[in-house]
């Protein structure tokens, strides 16, 4: 790939967003790939939204269903557990990532599994499951086409629905040719899929253990739902002897009937399709059909804490459709890697810092122009800008007491500005002083081409008109006096 | 009709020409304008940068200054969006019952300029003349927070002599975002570059908007790049007539 250094998607280790974004901004191929991919998905989405006259009602219904589930989350999860167990499933509860990893590895060791196949699951990426399993001697094979590309190319995901959207097909060809030993492979999409299919078939037939995520857990029946586009997921869900499903606790829906709304909004928002090609639903174990041992690992990992906060709770409505990142003008320029998390884009900017308890990823809530397009496209109406602003306040409250922040130009400037805005005469004096002060930076043409300190981040690409001789309020006062 | 003009802190300081245009336009339409001399800022900059207590103090100040105003007109959609979308939350968290009551009574009387013209004055044809090729940038706050819809287009359609060129990707942000433009200056610049491509592709002489903040961003880049296009607030176009053409700064 064009950037030599691999991005870091661990919030505890990732650099601040503005710094992480730089190599992405310089990577013209990556930006082209991201812009093209998101444009294609967005155009498809827009067409399908336009044909639904009840789209806004569907969004409201989806938000209500998710809120209902979150309101009584404990009750619905227990109901799910009871129903799933009654049908032969085993339900595990994991408080955090470490616990979940231990549980999954424990099941694999019980099964004597040295290999495991996987359906695309963001939750497993969140808990960094693959490296953990590999370190314990279990070989992990991804089966989602995009995940195969990333795994074979040793790349990191940059999107939650189309994780390899930053990779174009000539890059895919290079990865497949190199890792599968196919020197004459063309970059024709059909040839590439055929190569992946050949590679996958063997894994599907040979590996008896699989790991999946879940799109929804149904409390009413104990069923699990997975939606996908390729059918590789269905192979993982039906062929192996043992299936382990890892799901965030927020994934629960009260009723089976809720899928009617959720599947409509999910497919349209995620891939711009009326219906996703493969929807798999299963409940526990069916003797003689499909996996005979089935485990569900319910992962908290910070979700309960988000649930307790009134304004931020709506974060957990998220159904991981990725519409917010496709629409986001910041994501369009940087892709997902700059976010330092497996959850990129607008939803990642609010989810990641909250999942890590505001310890990490503190620059993410500021990595937005608050343009509001994420809220507009969100199928479950998460008011992302509102939460971004709320998290900014939390970060600021946490930071402003620190001695090192006292003379930080941004913090100092904000305190001074507050003082000025609290008294009109002070504000007016400051306007006058600013005009005098900026004079040395102002060219003969009346424009400022270069400023020091934080102003330099403005003048790096834009000029600034020098302050006019007369403010508006001074003009008004003069006019009023003249008319007397 | 009486209205109180809240000019906003940055228009007062950086764009007095916009303020003068609002005065010319509204007085021409028979509005009796008032200007509160103690006005400063709506608090948006503090709120969006995470300085909630400071934002609250500006918000409270705004409500106290304008609670008796018949109507408040603001030529900046992002400041109106701040008032509509964020004041309630700030007052719920930090204010008292009286303040919440005062704000609730004031809010329906706060108008963005194009709302005031179209909804309150029912003046779509404001008698403007501006013989230039113009493209309109729908700022994010005007588009998605205030839902201005076709109001700006209806107003611009009635400007005599003007050719309005549609802007591709109208809904896309210019990358300003207040302190975002310096906190994330590089990403903001990349967004600006993409937006500028669309704006320049119209071949217009002017790019207009209802927010001088976006225009400061776009115009700053145009000037830096000797791009051959200027920015102008819509109030200045609507105020412009044959007898008193818009003052266009270099």
Image (cartoon, rainbow, N blue to C red):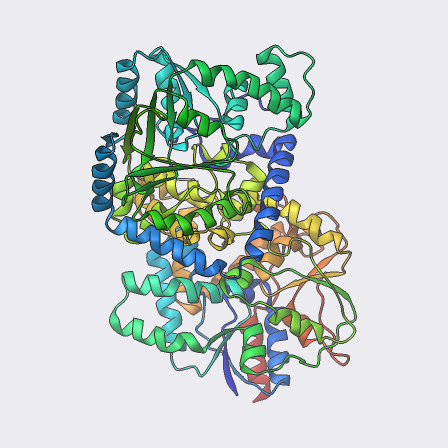
**Image vertical order of residue A478 relative to residue A217, above or below:** below
Q: In the rendered view, does A143 fall on the left or right side of B189?
A: left
User: In the rendering, at what x and y percent does residue A292 appear?
Assistant: 31, 23
Q: Residue at x 34, y 50 (%)?
A: A66
**Which is more toward the observer, B70 or B105?**
B105
Q: Residue at x 68, y 23 (%)?
A: A187
User: In the rendering, at what x and y percent does residue B183 appear?
Assistant: 49, 44
Q: Residue at x 58, y 78 (%)?
A: B117
Residue B57 lies in what quarter of the image? bottom left
Residue A101 lies in what quarter of the image? top left
Quadrant where the image shows the C terminus of chain B: bottom right
Q: In the rendered view, does A290 fall on the left or right side of B143?
A: left
Q: Can residue A283 be seen here?
A: yes
Q: Can residue A6 be seen here?
A: no
**Image vertical order of residue B70 relative to residue B98, above or below:** below
User: In the rendering, at what x and y percent does residue A37 appear?
Assistant: 61, 38
Q: Residue at x 37, y 65 (%)?
A: B87
Q: In the rendered view, does B25 fall on the left or right side of B130?
A: left
């Amino acid at each position: 790939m064009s950037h030599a250094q691999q991005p870091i998607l661990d919030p505890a280790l990732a650099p601040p967003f503005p710094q992480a974004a730089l190599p992405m901004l310089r990577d013209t191929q990556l930006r082209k790939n991201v812009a093209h991919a998101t444009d294609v998905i967005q155009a498809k989405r827009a067409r399908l939204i336009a044909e639904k006259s009840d789209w806004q009602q569907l969004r409201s219904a989806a938000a209500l269903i998710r809120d209902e589930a979150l309101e009584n989350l404990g009750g619905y999860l227990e109901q799910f557990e009871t129903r799933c167990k009654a049908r032969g499933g085993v339900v595990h509860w994991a408080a955090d990532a470490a616990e979940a990893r231990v549980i999954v590895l424990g099941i694999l060791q019980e099964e004597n599994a040295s290999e495991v196949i996987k359906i695309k699951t963001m939750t497993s990426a969140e808990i960094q499951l693959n490296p953990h399993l590999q370190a314990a001697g279990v070989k992990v094979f991804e089966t989602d086409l995009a995940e195969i590309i990333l795994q074979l190319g040793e790349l990191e995901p940059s999107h939650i629905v189309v994780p390899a959207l930053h990779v174009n097909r000539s890059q895919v060809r290079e990865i497949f040719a190199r890792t599968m030993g196919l020197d004459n492979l063309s970059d024709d999409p059909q040839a590439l899929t055929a190569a992946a299919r050949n590679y996958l078939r063997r894994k599907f037939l040979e590996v008896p253990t699989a790991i999946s995520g879940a799109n929804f857990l149904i409390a009413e029946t104990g069923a699990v739902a997975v939606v996908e586009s390729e059918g590789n997921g269905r192979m993982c869900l039906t062929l192996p002897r043992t299936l382990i499903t890892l799901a965030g606790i927020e994934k629960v829906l009260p009723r089976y009937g809720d899928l009617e709304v959720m599947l409509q909004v999910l497919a349209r928002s995620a891939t711009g399709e009326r219906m996703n090609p493969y929807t798999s639903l299963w409940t526990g174990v069916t003797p003689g059909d499909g996996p005979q041992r089935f485990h569900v690992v319910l992962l908290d990992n910070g979700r309960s804490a988000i649930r307790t906060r009134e304004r931020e709770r709506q974060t957990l409505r998220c159904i991981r459709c990725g519409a917010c990142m496709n629409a986001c003008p910041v994501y369009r320029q940087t892709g997902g890697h700059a976010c330092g998390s497996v959850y990129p884009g607008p939803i990642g900017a609010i989810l990641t810092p909250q999942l890590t308890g505001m310890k990490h990823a503190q620059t993410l809530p500021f990595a937005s122009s608050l343009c509001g397009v994420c809220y507009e496209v969100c199928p479950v109406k998460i008011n992302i800008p509102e939460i971004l602003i709320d998290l900014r306040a939390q970060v600021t409250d946490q930071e402003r007491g620190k001695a090192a922040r006292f003379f930080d130009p941004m913090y100092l400037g904000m305190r001074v500005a507050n003082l000025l805005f609290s008294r009109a005469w002070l504000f007016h004096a400051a306007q006058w002083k600013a005009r005098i002060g900026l004079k040395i930076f102002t060219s003969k043409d009346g424009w400022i081409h270069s400023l020091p300190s934080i102003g330099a981040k403005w003048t790096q690409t834009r000029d600034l008109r020098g302050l006019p001789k007369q403010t508006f309020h001074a003009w008004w006062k003069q006019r009023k006096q003249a008319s007397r | 009709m009486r209205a109180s003009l809240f000019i906003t802190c940055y228009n007062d300081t950086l764009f007095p020409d916009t303020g003068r245009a609002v005065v010319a336009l509204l007085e021409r339409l028979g509005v009796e304008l008032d200007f509160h001399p103690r006005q400063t800022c709506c608090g948006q900059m503090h709120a969006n940068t995470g300085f909630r207590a400071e934002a609250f103090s500006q918000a409270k100040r705004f409500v106290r200054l304008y609670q008796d105003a018949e109507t408040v007109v603001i030529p900046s959609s992002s400041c109106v969006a701040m008032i509509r979308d964020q004041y309630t939350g700030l007052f719920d968290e930090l204010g008292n019952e009286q303040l919440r009551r005062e704000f609730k009574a004031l809010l329906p009387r706060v108008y963005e300029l194009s709302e005031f013209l179209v909804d309150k004055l029912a003046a779509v044809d404001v008698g403007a003349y501006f013989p230039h090729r113009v493209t309109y940038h729908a700022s994010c706050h005007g588009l998605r927070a205030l839902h201005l819809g076709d109001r700006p287009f209806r107003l611009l359609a009635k400007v005599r002599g003007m050719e309005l060129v549609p802007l591709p990707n109208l809904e896309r942000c210019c990358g300003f975002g207040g302190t975002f433009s310096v906190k994330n200056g590089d990403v903001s610049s990349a967004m600006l570059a993409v937006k500028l491509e669309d704006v320049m592709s119209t071949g217009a002489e002017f790019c207009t908007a209802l927010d001088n903040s976006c225009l400061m961003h776009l115009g700053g880049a145009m000037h830096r790049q000797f791009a051959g296009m200027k920015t102008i607030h819509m109030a200045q176009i609507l105020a412009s007539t044959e007898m008193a053409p818009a003052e266009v700064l270099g």
